[in-house]
């Protein structure tokens, strides 16, 4: 009887097991406007960043990067980013986004954008851009950034039991019933 009881527990655990899933959040860049002071005295440019990125704040993994950057050099042929990260060692905490836009002819601009007072989480929300730095590729100096990013959790499908598991569970129950019937006088 002990073996039957152990088999039943193992079968129950097998049938109730589900795979862990990462929680992605789609972050939408809502027309971030970057103002730059040009190398020529008095010149000023406004660059625009739009698009989306799926990001899991627990693992720091991003996917489905779809960013569009239009600036004083025109429209970027590719826009990438090296990472998001949360800075929690200072007060107030903030999030940082590093971006690089590449243009025809190999020219590029790199920025580091801070979203002050808020952290990227898997709960989503809205983070307002608070500070920007030109990180390389341009003699222009980024002076301000306005706009926000909005995060919305990507719905994940709930696991559905597979038919094989139901058959296995049913077969186990029938086996238990047959064994208990055999032991009755």
Image (cartoon, rainbow, N blue to C red):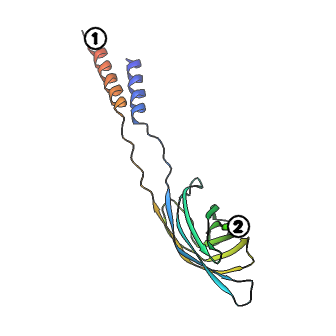
- Percent across and percent down for residue 117 are 58, 73
Q: Give the residue at the far top of this rendering.
A: 185
Looking at the image, which residue is at 63% across and 67% down?
Answer: 96
Q: Nearer the viewer, residue 84 or 177?
A: 84
| Secondary structure at numbered mark 2 | helix
The reply, left or right, for residue 88 in relation to residue 181 is right
Local crowd size for mark 2, using a 10 Å CA cut-off: few (<14), some (14–19), many (≥20): few
Q: Nearer the viewer, mark 1 or mark 2?
A: 2
Above or below residue 149? Residue 154 is above
Write down the residue under mark 2: 105
Answer few, some or many: residues within 10 Å of disc 1's Cα (few below 14, many 20 plus, some between 14 and 19).
few
To which residue does mark 1 refer? Answer: 182
Q: Position of residue 46 (x, y in %)?
A: 61, 81
Q: Quadrant of the C terminus?
A: top left
Residue at point 59%, 70% (across, down): 69
Query: Which residue is more in the foreground, 161 or 30?
Result: 30
Q: Quadrant of the N terminus?
A: top left
Report the side of 105 relative to 28 (left or right). right
Please tell me which of labels 1 and 2 falls first in the chain.
2
Q: Is residue 69 above or below residue 58?
A: below
Residue 160 horizontal side relative to residue 55, left or right: left
């Amino acid at each position: 009887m002990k073996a039957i009881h152990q088999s039943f527990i193992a079968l129950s655990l097998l049938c109730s097991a589900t795979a862990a899933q990462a929680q992605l959040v789609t972050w939408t860049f809502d027309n971030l406007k970057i103002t730059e002071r040009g190398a020529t005295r008095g010149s000023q440019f406004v660059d625009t960043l739009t698009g989306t990125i799926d990001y899991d704040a627990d693992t720091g993994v991003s996917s489905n990067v779809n960013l569009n950057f239009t600036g004083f050099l025109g429209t970027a042929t590719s826009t990438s980013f090296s990472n998001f990260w949360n800075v929690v060692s200072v007060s107030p905490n903030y999030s940082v986004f590093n971006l690089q836009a590449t243009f025809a002819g190999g020219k590029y601009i790199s920025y580091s954008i801070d979203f002050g007072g808020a952290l990227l989480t898997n709960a989503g929300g809205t983070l307002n851009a608070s500070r920007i730095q030109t990180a390389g590729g341009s003699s222009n100096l980024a002076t301000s950034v306005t706009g926000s990013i909005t995060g919305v959790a990507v719905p994940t499908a709930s696991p559905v039991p597979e038919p094989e598991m139901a058959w296995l569970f049913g077969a186990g129950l029938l086996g238990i019933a047959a064994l208990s019937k055999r032991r009755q006088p």
